[in-house]
Image: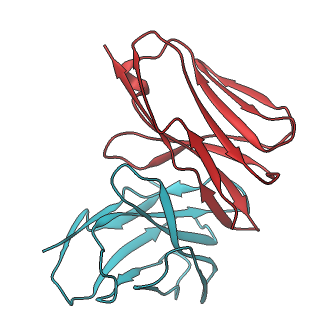
Chain colours: A red, B cyan
Amino acid sequence: GQQVMQIPQYQHVQEGEDFTTYCNSSTTLSNIQWYKQRPGGHPVFLIQLVKSGEVKKQKRLTFQFGEAKKNSSLHITATQTTDVGTYFCACTSGTYKYIFGTGTRLKVLA
Amino acid sequence: DGGITQSPKYLFRKEGQNVTLSCEQNLNHDAMYWYRQDPGQGLRLIYYSQIVNDFQKGDIAEGYSVSREKKESFPLTVTSAQKNPTAFYLCASTGHPQETQYFGPGTRLLVL
């Protein structure tokens, strides 16, 4: 079945450093969503990308969708301790089924 | 206050016992989902339902059962056939295909 792989699995950064997580698929995606899960919490929707080459920004977060719609990235500029958590990408398979990536766990050292 | 509620927050199961996890939403969403998350792992789909009285198996449905008798409710039963049920269970819903998934706060199931 369809799978999305995320790298890296873990990332530790010093506060103020940048962070990037990548999401890759072997098949063309109709869309890609990004979620953040704080430690002990539940996933919360961040953004959805639909168009080839699309770039969206939310304050210090930049989301990109690849030209071939097979990969996506989330970049955080100047990380803060509030950025700690696990970031998941997700795509839809069929109409209502969602496939989640394995997630990247971010730790920010103050 | 709209959203998804899950209960209980923590649940303990004895060997050979069936337990039911509750999920209720007041978002008027058609589709509802159950995911399992193991420590340090991603989300794996157990079951999903696109409409009342209909549901489909996800990737790890064995040992689980669901029902969808009402639009607002999608309970998950963890049966005794599920040999390794200890995990964090998340319920989610979505209003339209390929749109945002809204998650409940989750239920942590532990086996005694």
Image quadrant of residue A2?
bottom right
Q: Where is residue B55 in the image (x, y as percent from the top left)?
A: 60, 84
Q: Where is residue A38 in the image (x, y as percent from the top left)?
A: 38, 39
Image quadrant of residue A76?
top right
Image quadrant of residue A6?
top right
Q: Residue at x 50, y 64 (%)?
A: B44
Front-most of residues A82 and A5: A5
Q: Position of residue B36 (x, y in %)?
A: 42, 65
Outermost residue on the left side: it is B112
Note whether A13 is above or below B25 in the view shown: above
Q: In this view, does A101 lie to the left or right of B8?
A: right
Q: Is residue B7 left or right of residue A99?
A: left
Q: Is residue A33 left or right of residue B14?
A: right
Front-most of residues B29 and A72: A72
Give the position of the C terminus of chain B as an image quadrant.
Answer: bottom left
Q: How many marks?
A: 0
Q: Which residue is drawn at 37% across and 49% down?
A: B40
Front-most of residues B16 and A25: A25
Q: Residue at x 39, y 63 (%)?
A: B5
Q: Position of residue B51 (x, y in %)?
A: 65, 80
Note whether A28 is above or below B82 in the view shown: above
